Amino acid sequence: MSKDITSRADDYSQWYIDLVRKAGLADYSAVKGCMVIKPYGFAIWENMRDTLDRMFKDTGHVNAYFPLFIPKSFLSKEAAHIEGFAKECAVVTHYRLKNAEDGSGLIVDPDAKLEEELIVRPTSETIIWNTYREWIDSYRDLPLLINQWANVVRWEMRTRLFLRTTEFLWQEGHTAHATRDEAIDETRKMLDVYATFAEEWMAMPVIKGVKTANERFAGAEDTYCIEALMQDGKALQAGTSHFLGQNFAKAFDVQFNTKDNTREYVWATSWGVSTRLMGALVMAHSDDDGLVIPPRLAPTHVVIVPIPKPTPELVERATAIANDLRSKGVRVKIDTDDQNRPGYKFAEYEKLGIPVRLGLGARDLENGTIEVARRDTKEKASVDITTITDHIVKLLDDIQANMLERARAYRDEHITPVDTWDEFVRLLDEKGGFLSAHWDGTGETEELIKTETKATIRCIPLNNPQEAGTCIKTGKPSTQRVLFARAY
RNA sequence: CGGGGUGUAGCGUAGCCCGGUUAGCGCGUCUGCUUUGGGAGCAGAAGGUCGCAGGUUCGAAUCCUGCCACCCCGACCA
């Protein structure tokens, strides 16, 4: 076990914090609730971002950028929207500082008060829809498929590295469509993009579903989501895609001329994922020795460690191997540090979650072998050095697949059908994970269950089988099971 | 916003209750030697406004007052 990381069994929450900090993903900053994303963490985020960006563009979207500040009046135009965000907005009231008369330092200049306060965006629907009014006149202007990479601020009362910080990075897609069906298709399409990304890149299986009214995005008609399961049995909402109906079009008066020369409000979607995915990645795969990063997102795939120390001969040999690997698209680092000993380096690279470590020493040169250690299973093998490139290329695919498989097996074991309230309460504490149970469909019952157990309805899975049953809590009739869990 | 905790070297901490030499220890850093296939050893060295501001006292990291900051738990949330 790692020297400086709390074990999951001892304190899961502390384990997560230790990992994020000790592996160099992020750190606390001088600003309450805000974190510094360190180079290694940012490199992983860049890989996520670049991949998603490509996927958005492949589905016809383009990037744009809208202001950080939103006039207060914009936010109040959509009633449900402001209801949801008002309590967590940072507000700019002045635009100048000055030296205090009594020499006590800088103060806000009372003469520099803004006519209208500016809100630091918690999300950009309002500023974007205000802009779309100018951009959309005709059905020929539709669909409008725009994405923005940005930072947003939500003044949460309690924060947690990556999972919930005051400022966070994300992307927000905002699209406008001529018809309801087309907007719903878009909402679902982007949900699929997120699910594909989570599974194929993050090796994290997710459940696609729709939120109940209580859990819906403020201002949406429907909120679709992908829900993932963390190793402590808690669920994590990893991405959302909202069908906004005509709510924002009406609030910002965005109408267009149809082919038939009628005037109609446009239909909207918005969808987003954030740096929260970093937290999900950590909690889905990592272990007591450190991070375990899926190869497709790892900044470094392979590290070559000359043993016991880098001699010219070993480095030359390592460089040849590295160059061959790089020609196959493998990201390789050669450890040329001559201070630390191999054991120390092994532990460090395991902490960083680098998928494959190669050990190359005099013994290997003699035997024509190289030691291959994989991070996900911690298995080590001695491999014929002449076949190492092909071996690694295949191994990286194996690791990616194995990580997904392992996470999926854990997830599947933790979806438990439950039919009685006693069992529901017991399993929440003893097993965790998703509990598949009947629910009477009312917000009141959902709220009651949440108050009593802290479990929420994570989603109603898409293509959910319909079956008659009775609500786990009230015994009233129900037509389908929904997924409950305690969540981050 | 409620409850709890912490603030001493780059990091982690002891000392505080019960005031008294030069604020101790571990990690890390630097130098040297020996080591080196799973977190090396020995020797030496550098590194401190004890969170900030007042107060009590011959004397304050320690006692008193006020302030600030951050973390953790809960309610709110991506």
Image (cartoon, coloured by chain):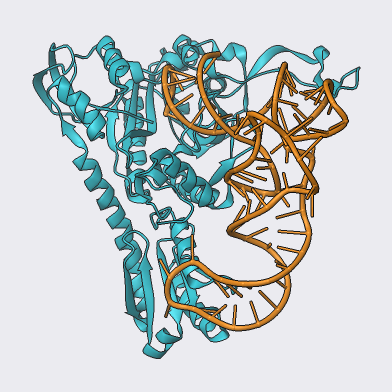
Q: Which chain is orange?
A: B
In the image, residue A388 above or below residue A3: below
Farthest-out residue, bottom:
A366
Above or below — where is A123 with respect to A163?
above
Residue at x 29% of width, y 24% of height: A455
Establish if A39 lies above or below A85.
below
- Is residue A97 visible in the rendered structure shown here? no
Quadrant including the C terminus of chain A: top left
Question: In the image, what residue occupies the spot 54% across and 10% down?
Answer: A76
Which corner quadrant of the image does residue A195 belong to?
top left
Is B43 placed left or right of A221 in the picture? right
Decide if residue A328 is on the left or right side of residue A480.
Answer: right
| Quadrant of the frame with the N terminus of chain A | bottom left
Rendered location of residue A287, percent (x, y): 37, 51
- Colour chain A is painted in: cyan
| Residue found 33% across the figure and 57% down from its top | A400
Q: From this viewpoint, is residue A44 visible?
A: yes
| Between B20 and B5, the one nearer to me in the picture | B20
